[in-house]
Image (cartoon, rainbow, N blue to C red):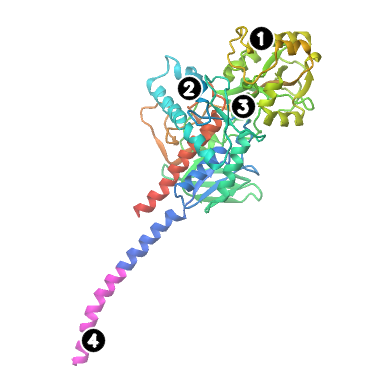
Amino acid sequence: MTKRRIYFLIILSVLIPITAVLYHRFTITTASLTKMASPAKQSVIVVGAGLAGLSASYSALQASAPSVRLLERASKPGGNSIKASSGINGAPTRFQNVEKYGVDDKFLDDTARSAGIRLNSADVSPAVKKQREALISTLTKRSASAIEFLADLGVDLSVVAQLGGHSLPRTHRGAGKTPPGAAIVTTLLGKLKEQEGFELVTDVEVTKLLRDGEAVTGVEYRDRKDESIHKLHGPVVFATGGFAGDTHGLLAKYRPDLDGLPSTNDPRPGAHTVLEEVGAKLVDMDSVQIHPTGFVDPANTEAAVKFLAAEMLRGEGGVLLYKGRRVVNELETRERVSNALMALPRDETSGGGLKQWDVQLLLDPGAAEAAAGHVGFYLWKGLLQKRKIGELDEQTRHTLKEYAAVAAGKKEDVLGRKAFGHWRLTEEDIDNGEQEVLVGRVTPITHFTMGGAVFNEHAQLLASELGGEEEKPIQGLWGAGEITGGLHGDNRLGGSSLLECVVFGRIAGEEAAKMITAAGKEV
């Protein structure tokens, strides 16, 4: 063997193991990069573009999610949130009048009391009570930061009113003419559109949650324009809203007695069955909130979907009259006011199978001025009309005169009302009869569903019953807003629907983003 060949074999024997090591190292590095790229390619998937979905999307991006895909079945975002007209609760906040009312520390107590027997009955198990209280505590304790979050984004929340069921004024709205739901939704949507990595997809229906074992790994959805089917992979936040408008579906299933009641919600099916298919449990599905005041449009009295007569109209001093007489403390909880009105004789002239009542909502000039942002719209739609006091019937004038005396502090209200908003008509004004009031017809309507998917204070949807022996979060799945249940119990306080969307939407978005970033760190 020649020396040249010996040298070649020696060099080859050295190069082969070095090449093998380098190849092995390159292979490991490439595999690692591939694994690391997987979380980066994932999006936080948010289903439903109401306030809960918008809050989740924004918070996910702020928590370093690489991207967010927001899927909405309607043609435009906003859901029912954009219609909200009374405001958003929060306490204690910088907008509340501390000098007059002191620091507001009663929000938790008011919410717990409003939850009724589902929380407060002696028959409620300690485990169920604990889980409901944890949700209420999260909602109320994070309410102040929710108000600060929105105010910092540029939403005007400087006006604070007291709604029914509240012991203090804590429901925030703006001083302008834009209703609070629209103001909040449009501001947040505008901020989201400025964010890199955000995509809104409308006219799509999520039909299925994808799974790997028991964990949710994404969604399958149908494009309603061309019926094509698509899949997205990533952690999922479900925020599709309730089922108050699903009259002949889930509402008929869980509350057949409400069949025929008009609603503030569009007629669309609830998405709860999609969650049930992956093991999510439902709770309080028979707990449906009837709002006491939906406008009966004089131009279309038989319309099944009605505009809400905002609760703040009563909060600012408005009264409810049946044949000229007050029948309830207008600032009681929605449940009690609704029950009082539905105990009255029904309007038998209503057609189309609708169940309606003929109740009058009346605002004096002070209440109308304080609610100007809403009143202008209602007048434009013909839902409120101007009337001189002298044109009202004798019984109505007599009732207003008594109410004016109560509002002036001359005597106690026999119905127990303690706050009168901005009511300013005096007994003398009513005797004079020249001032104008605003009058509209209202009726109880289905408005909100307290029931939904069981969840915890981390916004995780659960495959275990409320108060079950072992809490079983569904990995990769969160929920926020009206799709969830267990928080409000028998009755939701006015102003807390927008609040729960912001509080639990933010939590859900943050937690979903953490799942992606944690996966990136592991590889």
Q: Which residue is mark 4?
A: 8
Q: Nearer the viewer, mark 2 or mark 4?
A: 2
Q: Which residue is mark 2?
A: 102
| Mark sitting earlier along the chain (2/3) | 2
Residue 317 percent coordinates (x, y): 65, 19
Q: Indicate which disc residue 36 carries.
A: none
Q: Answer with the quarter of the image where residue 15 lies.
A: bottom left
Q: Is residue 239 visible?
A: no
Kindly check if marks 2 and 3 are in contact, taking CB atoms under 8 A apart as contact.
no
The kind of secondary structure element at disc 1 is helix
Crowding near pointer 1: few (<14 within 10 Å), some, many (20+)? some
Q: Which residue is mark 1?
A: 405
Q: Nearer the viewer, mark 2 or mark 3?
A: 2
Residue placed most toward the observer, 508 or 23: 508
Cα distance between the residues tagged 2 and 3: 33 Å
What type is the residue that disc 3 sits on? His
Relative to 294, residue 207 above or below: below
Crowding near pointer 4: few (<14 within 10 Å), some, many (20+)? few
Q: Which residue is mark 3?
A: 447
Q: Give the farthest residue toward the front.
A: 99
Cα distance between the residues tagged 4 and 1: 113 Å
